[in-house]
Image: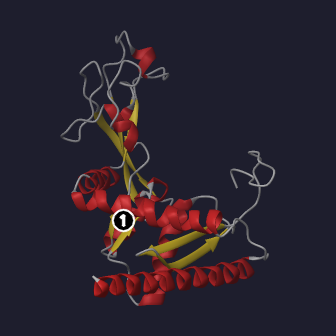
């Protein structure tokens, strides 16, 4: 864990990574492991959803911690409409200044090419296949061959030679698709709903219910405990919704 809630310090401690799939405010899926990285939990959660409900979800919404090449390609293969941000998206939207204009994300042009702040284009000089991960991908190597006499080279790169960058064209296409979807009314609404339901669920459990640590040990024991807690959460939420509906119906009849 990045933060110790009991000693109130930043000493790393062992813990469990609890993933909830939230549908309409209810906990519809649970996945627990000891991996500190959320990236590798997305596909197992989707596969478990498929096993439990007989199909993959039509829409999946997650924060930037779940955005990767593998997760985007998995979603595309299984026809999951994946709404998420990606690492660096906030930086891309910042105004270009003297301080940040040498970052790769600010060199990308509208046509997909790359050009340095001095106006020189990067050229493709090679490619390789990246096999680490769930799916293979092609990585292209780009080089700017005009760095030799550039007065701002020291600001742009620490390399002795020319500035080089590596890109995955397929990943870049996923990013383009993400930006387009998040700029739609549906995308904005779904991302807002994610903050309410997903973060709200954990907030209710930790703050309102006082459930901020597991009491069993071992993955199977922890999964059983979390499952029982989730059942209780869903029953309580469902009961409250029934009461709210009955109350509204009664008020309508009285009026």
- The image quarter in which residue 154 lies: top left
Q: Which residue is mark 1?
A: 73
Percent position of residue 231, x then y: 58, 85
Q: Secondary structure at mark 1?
A: helix
* Outermost residue, left side: 111
> Can residue 203 be seen in the rendering of this structure?
yes
Nearer to me, 153 or 183: 183
Classify 170 as above or below 97.
below
Query: What colouring method underlies this structural image?
Result: secondary structure
Q: Quadrant of the C terminus?
A: bottom left
- The image quarter in which residue 218 lies: bottom right
Classify 170 as above or below 126.
below
> Can residue 70 be seen in the rendering of this structure?
no
Tag count: 1
The residue located at (35%, 81%) in the rendering is 248
The residue located at (68%, 51%) in the rendering is 2
The residue located at (44%, 17%) in the rendering is 155
Nearer to me, 210 or 157: 210
The residue located at (47%, 79%) in the rendering is 47
Classify 23 as above or below 52.
above
Q: Residues within 10 Å of mark 1 (few under 14, many from 20)?
A: some
Residue 95 placement, left or right of 242: left
Q: Quadrant of the N terminus?
A: bottom right
Nearer to me, 107 or 56: 56
Percent position of residue 202, x then y: 57, 65
Nearer to me, 95 or 176: 95
Classify 14 as above or below 245.
above
Percent position of residue 136, x then y: 42, 62
Percent position of residue 149, x then y: 34, 10
């Amino acid at each position: 864990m990045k933060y110790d809630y009991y000693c109130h310090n930043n000493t790393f401690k062992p813990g469990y990574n609890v993933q909830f799939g939230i549908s309409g405010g209810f906990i519809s899926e649970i996945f627990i492991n000891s991996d500190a990285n959320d990236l590798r939990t997305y596909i197992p959660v989707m596969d478990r959803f498929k096993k439990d409900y007989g199909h993959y979800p039509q829409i999946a919404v997650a924060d930037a911690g779940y955005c990767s090449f593998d997760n985007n390609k998995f979603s595309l293969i299984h026809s999951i409409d994946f709404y998420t941000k990606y690492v660096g998206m906030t930086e891309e939207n910042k105004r270009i200044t003297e301080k940040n204009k040498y970052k790769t994300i600010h060199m990308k042009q509208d046509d997909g090419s790359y050009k340095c702040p001095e106006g020189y284009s990067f050229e493709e000089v090679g490619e390789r296949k990246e096999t680490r991960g769930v799916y293979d991908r092609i990585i292209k190597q780009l080089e700017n061959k005009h760095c030799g006499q550039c007065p701002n080279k020291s600001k742009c790169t620490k390399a002795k030679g020319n500035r080089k960058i590596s890109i995955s064209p397929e990943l870049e296409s996923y990013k383009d698709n993400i930006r387009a979807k998040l700029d739609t009314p549906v995308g904005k609404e779904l991302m807002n709903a994610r903050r309410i339901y997903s973060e709200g669920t954990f907030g209710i459990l930790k703050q309102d219910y006082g459930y901020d640590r597991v009491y069993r040990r071992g993955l199977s024991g922890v999964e059983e405990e979390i499952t029982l807690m989730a059942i209780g959460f869903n029953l309580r939420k469902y009961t409250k919704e029934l009461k709210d509906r009955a109350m509204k119906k009664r008020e309508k009849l009285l009026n």
